[in-house]
Amino acid sequence: MKICVTGGAGYIGSHVCKALAEAGHEVVVYDNLSTGHRSFVRWGPFRHGDIRDTARFRACLREFKPDGIIHFAASAYVGESVVDPGKYFSNNVGGTLSILEAMRDEGCPAIVVSGTCAVYGEPKEVPIAESCPPNPINPYGASKLFMERMLADFATAHDVRWMSLRYFNAAGSSPRGEIGELHEPETHLIPRVMFAALGSIDAIDIFGTDYPTPDGTCIRDYIHVDDLARAHIRALEHLVDGGESMALNLGTERGASVREIIRGVEKISGRQVPARAMERRAGDPAVLVADAAKAREVLGWKAERNLETMLEDAWNFLTARKDA
Ligand code: UFG
């Protein structure tokens, strides 16, 4: 297949490009480098542009005539979305609309988008299946849910197939360590615990120790980025083969608490992680764990890498950069 990857210079996008190239597909990356890294674009040509620039994106589709698009270009900080919702509706909703219009005009038939478990908000039951009614509690989740709504409406009106992959907590990195999680600022738990292990921050702040969980800290379903990458390829193949459009959860179906992550990092690094208990962070549900049965059924996909592998790969990426 020939595939255009928007946001292909970012964390998950670059891992998907690598997996696509290794599977023999042709990739073009379209990215405005607002948060992505030029050095992560290694598996095909690069076109610099914003997804909201419809004419530019349309030109990219006209030039490459891809069989499909995998769309990652989006803003993805929950906290920022609360203080600057306009950015999220412009980039995520407006940007996706621009992509859909370009696809319609250029006859590009299929799109896989980066969804999120944030569409579920505070879930009524865990594990969370796709049948759980979406009810986002922040503008980030709302923008991703509205993207799905637009995809469904474009699919009804035009010849476009779509899949939204609602991931839980992406983690880890390519085992070779050439690409990985590198956000600025870095707010995610696993890299921050590693920063504390390496001494580049004083301590990891544990946001809330009074949750109704066995050790009082939040539980999340961490999933290896390479498992996510495989699912995107399967999803696009499914659509290109004429499969049905839908939203699917992607997770390991196993939860880990903040304290378990800290212990896991101590084990793989052989270092102590200084930690301090803090107040809860606003908008954090106690437990988010996926029911990924539908992805197994529709895509024949299941997560293969465990938490230890995720932590080892993330550690290797970070320490390789630190030594560089
Ligand atoms: N946490 C800490 N200390 C930190 C950072 C995080 O205790 O310094 C805790 C959080 O409170 C949370 C857990 O670690 O309980 C995981 O937090 P992350 O920030 O790593 O991830 P989130 O679960 O907040 O966010 C992820 C994705 C979002 C997505 C969201 C859905 O990064 O894009 O899941 O809930 F929207």
Image (cartoon, helix red, strand yellow):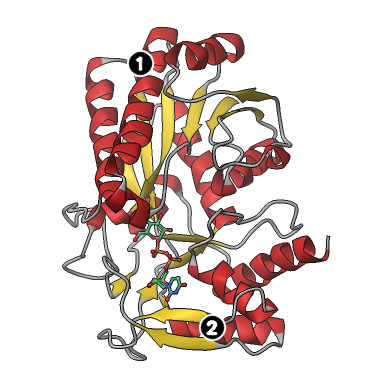
Q: Secondary structure at mark 2?
A: helix
According to the image, label 1 marks what residue? 101
Residue 46 location (% of width, % of height): 67, 26
Which residue is depicted at the point 52% across and 52% down? 228
| Ligand 1 contact, mark 2 (Cβ < 8 Å) | no
What is the number of the mark on residue 298? none
N-term-proximal mark, 2 vs 1: 1
| Depth order, front residue of 76/79 | 79
Which residue is depicted at the point 35% across and 78% down? 218
Quadrant that contains the C terminus? bottom right
Residue 273 location (% of width, % of height): 60, 86
Res 48 → quadrant: top right
| Ligand 1 contact, mark 1 (Cβ < 8 Å) | no
Q: Quadrant of ligand 1?
A: bottom left
Left or right of 190 in this view: 90: left
Which residue is depicted at the point 40% across and 75% down? 255
According to the image, label 2 marks what residue? 262
